[in-house]
Image (spheres, helix red, strand yellow):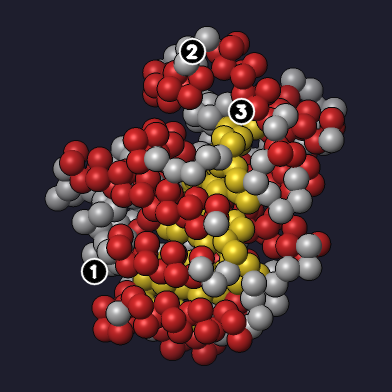
Amino acid sequence: MVKELNDLKKLLCPPGEGVFTVHTAKERRLELQEKIYQTSSDKKIRTLWEKSLKTIPNTSLAVIGIPSDNGGGIQRGANWGPLSVRLAMLTEGAPEFLDLGDIRVIPHLLHDKYLKSDIISECRKALYGSNKTLLPVSPLSIAERSIQILHKIKKGLKIFAIGGDHSVSYALVKAFIEAKKKEKVKIGFLHFDAHTDLMQKRLGIDLCFGSWTYHIMKLLPTPAHIVQVGIRSSGKPKSYWEKTLGVKQWWAKDVQKLGIEAITEKTINHFKKLKVTELYISFDIDALDEKFAAATGTPEPDGLKPYECVTMIRAVASHFKITGADLVEVAPFVLPPNSNIQDQKQSVATAAIIARVLLEAMND
Ligand SMILES: [Mn+2]
């Protein structure tokens, strides 16, 4: 465990430090860190954070920030999601959890497989002080390795991640699926989103905000293990995705027509037929109507209402264990046309409610 813990201390950093700042915007992370650690001394913060990592073996619920938006592509800014959602969660409240901090992010990188060895070598020197290490350097690669190590230190650890653009869920869910295979647990995947994220590639890139679910689908026993809720902005109709790929979808208009209770019941029955016992929930904030989630990369009208999502999350949690979850695409400083600063604040406050509800569902 000593090696695993030492690797984590390199791959991760205290909460708020994943967005690398030297001077400009440093005050943003200090606002959070002073509240968590009651000090603004970088050295003291680091010591207290490292000490907290030692408690992982005695922890059941943990939070991690993945402040990378390099997999996004319309309007970025979700790199500030982990910091702002955590700040709002301090007001909103949540069950007790261990804050693992953020993964370290070089904002110009996405996944190590896209890099040449000489670049990896330079980035290892920058992040870890040596190119002799075998540790990964890109956000998705670091996220995946970190989740693998965490499951190794504590089998069954329930991890709630805050993104980041939606590509980060590829790394998180991939590592989750691997861990659950080892535990011999049958899992289902519940995905709240305005978009299907089921493209095979986008501009030739296979791992990004619009394609990550397609590649997760390949890691699940069948595509039917994916249930998507809130879809309303897609180049293809529902029948295409359901018939060609075999995923299960509830579009936002289905929720409006049938009601969230009926949709939830059908979803529970669907997962039960598949003999699923545990769920991973990935929540893209744009599943919510743009009235509640303006501060995101791709806000969409005619979306879900917060109470509908809360109802569904609580109901599925009473039938299945929620053992992994993420909340992504909160871009706190993004302000779309026809929205104002109040909309921005409301987006983050609503995200904190969803975060609390997901953490409560995992804590049960
Ligand atoms: Mn998405």
Question: Going 61% across and 58% down the picture, which residue do you hit?
Answer: 323
Categorize mark 2 by other alpha carbons within 10 Å: few (<14), some (14-19), many (20+).
few
Amino acid at circle 2: Thr
Categorize mark 3 by other alpha carbons within 10 Å: few (<14), some (14-19), many (20+).
many
Categorize mark 1 by other alpha carbons within 10 Å: few (<14), some (14-19), many (20+).
some
Q: Which residue is mark 3?
A: 13
Which of label 3 and label 2 is nearer to you?
2
Amino acid at circle 1: Asp
Q: Position of residue 186 (x, y in %)?
A: 70, 72
Q: Is residue 168 visible?
A: yes
Q: Helix, strand, or loop for circle 1? A: loop
Q: Which residue is mark 2?
A: 39
Amino acid at circle 3: Cys
**Front residue (pair 169, 183):** 183
Which quarter of the figure is the C terminus placed in? Answer: bottom right
Which quarter of the figure is the N terminus placed in? Answer: top right
Residues at marks 3 and 2, CA–CA distance in whole angstroms: 16 Å
Specify the label residue 302 is tagged with.
1
Q: Earlier in the sequence, mark 3 or mark 1?
A: 3
Q: Is mark 3 within 8 Å of ligand 1?
A: no
Q: Earlier in the sequence, mark 3 or mark 2?
A: 3
Q: Is residue 202 visible?
A: no
Q: Position of residue 102 (x, y in %)?
A: 57, 34
Q: Quadrant of residue 105?
A: top right
